[in-house]
Image (cartoon, rainbow, N blue to C red):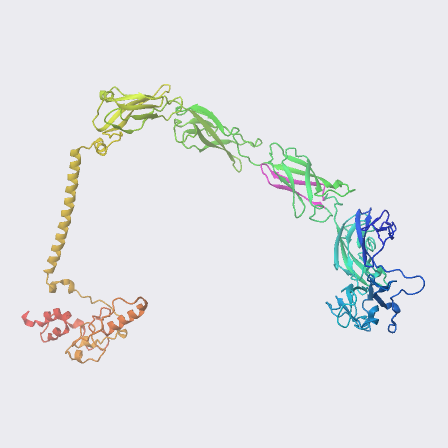
Amino acid sequence: VKFNNCAGNKGVRYETNSLDFKVRADGTLFAAHQLQVPLKPLVLRVTAWDPQSLGWQEAMVRFLVAEKLQHNGHKPKGWKTVPGDVGQQQSDTLLPWRQHQSPNGLRRQKRDWVIPPINVPENSRGPFPQQLVRIRSDKDKEIHIRYSITGVGADQPPMEVFSIDPVSGRMYVTRPMDREERASYHLRAHAVDMNGNKVENPIDLYIYVIDMNDNRPEFINQVYNGSVDEGSKPGTYVMTVTANDADDGTTANGMVRYRIVTQTPQSPSQNMFTINSETGDIVTVAAGLDREKVQQYIVIIQATDMEGNLNYGLSNTATAIITVTDVNDNPPEFTTSTYSGEVPENRVEVVVANLTVMDRDQPHSPNWNAIYRIISGDPSGHFTIRTDPVTNEGMVTVVKAVDYEMNRAFMLTVMVSNQAPLASGIQMSFQSTAGVTISVTDVNEAPYFPTNHKLIRLEEGVPTGTVLTTFSAVDPDRFMQQAVRYSKLSDPANWLNINATNGQITTAAVLDRESDYIKNNVYEATFLAADNGIPPASGTGTLQIYLIDINDNAPELLPKEAQICEKPNLNVINITAADADIDPNVGPFVFELPSVPSAVRKNWTITRLNGDYAQLSLRIMYLEAGVYDVPIIVTDSGNPPLYNTSVIKVKVCPCDENGDCTTIGAVAAAGLGTGAIIAILICIIILLTMVLLFVVWMKRREKERHTKQLLIDPEDDVRDNILKYDEEGGGEEDQDYDLSQLQQPETMDHVLNKTPGVRRVDERPIGAEPQYPIRPVIPHPGDIGDFINEGLRAADNDPTAPPYDSLLVFDYEGSGSTAGSVSSLNSSSSGDQDYDYLNDWGPRFKKLADMYGGGEED
């Protein structure tokens, strides 16, 4: 067995999985002792221990065992020589089934032969079928034997790759073989008699396809991407390319070797890289990789089988793209040695200067990104330098306000570096430091109160005009001659005044600690201090006044109302007091009854419970129910003490057995006797009676009014005699009325003989009235349009309906009228005109007929 560890196989140790065989250091396999090997395939596992890689490698070894041949030049008994075809050697005939004759005449069955593998080259051109071997049994002299084969390639897919002549035992291959499709076949040969009875045991046939160099190496990727740092030393690993050959890797057909065909660009050398011919590892072979000069190399790799023999091997190519990665071999450098800027005082987050640098490393990488630091010139930390992520510039920014009165200028020394440290052997440049001069400009600053919030303490109740303190402000602009004036900004109770020039604060009213403007005994006021600069500036200050309590509030009795039973010892009234002051001007309180009037102490008594509470109860055995005002004097513990006489309204009422006032007792306690309640009820009844009488009188008056209206003659009712004649129509052309009926009303024939459809529209027709269907009152919700149209048609065709929706024209004057002018009429009539026809014009002309029809009788 062979083992190659690329180190001369030094120290390699071999082992097997059998105690019968051992392996020497040179790989020779030998029998450890004398033994009888059975006539069947023998497989051993050989393990090689590599001390270099500390790993195990295993290989399987298959033995083909055969019996020893006699050395006298005679063939062993049982072999039969069967002539083959033309070109077929005698060794092509196999007798796998052997039998031996024992000396006593019995036949002894020997163990079966193991047939050595049959090798068939792939891609054979034929002719087909092509004979591989002939097998036969030595019993074929005695009986007729039929041969057959089974297995993959015979009676299993792929079918009929191999065939056998059942009579002669010749086995053939029927088509070209492809080792890459299947490298070996395992068949079994059978021998039976004419009746199908087994004559011999089946034997195994192993057929191996011999590899031919018919496949090119194929790269796993057509394009490989790798990278290497600039400035790398020779021998630095870059990447690995891999090509696979489908041919047998244990032969030269599948042994691939690599080489570099071309390199682009060929700078600084045409051979910057080399490749391991067996593993495909690409490494650097020369120094001088510089990303700033060459950022990428394109290398063409060729893979050739037949161990790299370009004359006989097949080749293929792939592309390796090698990117030179950046390392921080270029320190950042300032473009100038000095920078300047200007900033107003009291301003923050202002960029006062931009620092520009140059870095030849890859932009927007840690090797290019700049970091700025202030080395000196800013001990108080007024400035910081932030990096612009796009331009890589340093922005000098104010983070702490500067004061012109303290510093008029700053001289900063700054240094720049990268996020990533410099590569080994690279030193910082002297151009990595620069100076920055920053000038501070003066602005008008607001005055400020040094003590803000200022707290003072005083007693409440100080008189008006008392000087409390001086609340003055300071103008920080020492180099400007400016005046400061003061004013109030917030004074909720309007208790204070401030002097406009010196800030002296006085009281404008009495300060009361118990006021709603006081929070936790403190009163706050805010004042404004403004200078006269350009532009003016102002500042605010808060004054806190802590008011010390004095005893200026007398206690108040609680509660104001109470309820008690008319008999004592059933319940009492708990009383206490409330005082707006605070300790020590509050409790303990003293509760006592006044001596005047004397009935108070006669009827009531007070029992002290503690410093804050007492009990009010009846002194006598019975007190009539009612409401009593009981005065009580409450005195606090202040210095001097204050007292207050408070009145508590006590309702005395009869009580039940539980000590609760009864309903009747509650009413009586309210001060209303039985007589008062009866009087109230009588007043309510009288009021209801008056309201009822008023309603009856109103209804009777309405009835009389309606009765009086019925006594008036309808003929004398002027409301029906007032007719309106000033209506104007749309013109003669727009009317369909026959105006001639108004101009010549001599006879009534025109009424009876007028054509259908032409009639007066202001009178009822003469003759029998036709019956018309009653109009629907409630339309169907879905037919509202039809209902309106039907109602319109019924109104148009009903001659009995008055023309309330018609336009009547009474002021028509036209040319050629047969009627005379109205102006020619006068009140004096000769009496020749006959007005009797007016009686035939209907009820609307009845008044006119009565006026003119009377003649001389009137």
Queried whether the magenta region covers residue 335, the answer comes back as yes
Which of 50/653 is in front?
50
Which of 725/113 is in front?
113
Q: Is residue 173 left or right of residue 696?
A: right
Query: How far from the left and from the top, in percent, is residue 110?
Result: 83, 62
Asked where in the image residue 304 lies, by quadrant, the reply is bottom right
Q: Quadrant of the N terminus?
A: bottom right
What residue do we see at 60% from left, 32% from top? 405
What residue do we see at 37% from left, 26% from top? 580
What residue do we see at 10% from left, 61% from top? 712
Would you place residue 287 above or below residue 606 in this image? below
Count of marks placed on residues: 0
What residue do we see at 45% from left, 27% from top? 545
Q: Which residue is at the far right? A: 72
Which of 853/88 is in front?
88
Query: How far from the left and from the top, in percent, is residue 724?
Result: 20, 66
Q: Is residue 137 visible?
A: no
Query: How far from the left and from the top, in percent, is residue 22?
Result: 85, 50
Chain part drawn in magenta: 334-358
Q: Quadrant of the C terminus?
A: bottom left
Overall secondary structure of the magenta stretch?
Answer: strand
Queried whether the magenta region covers residue 409, the answer comes back as no
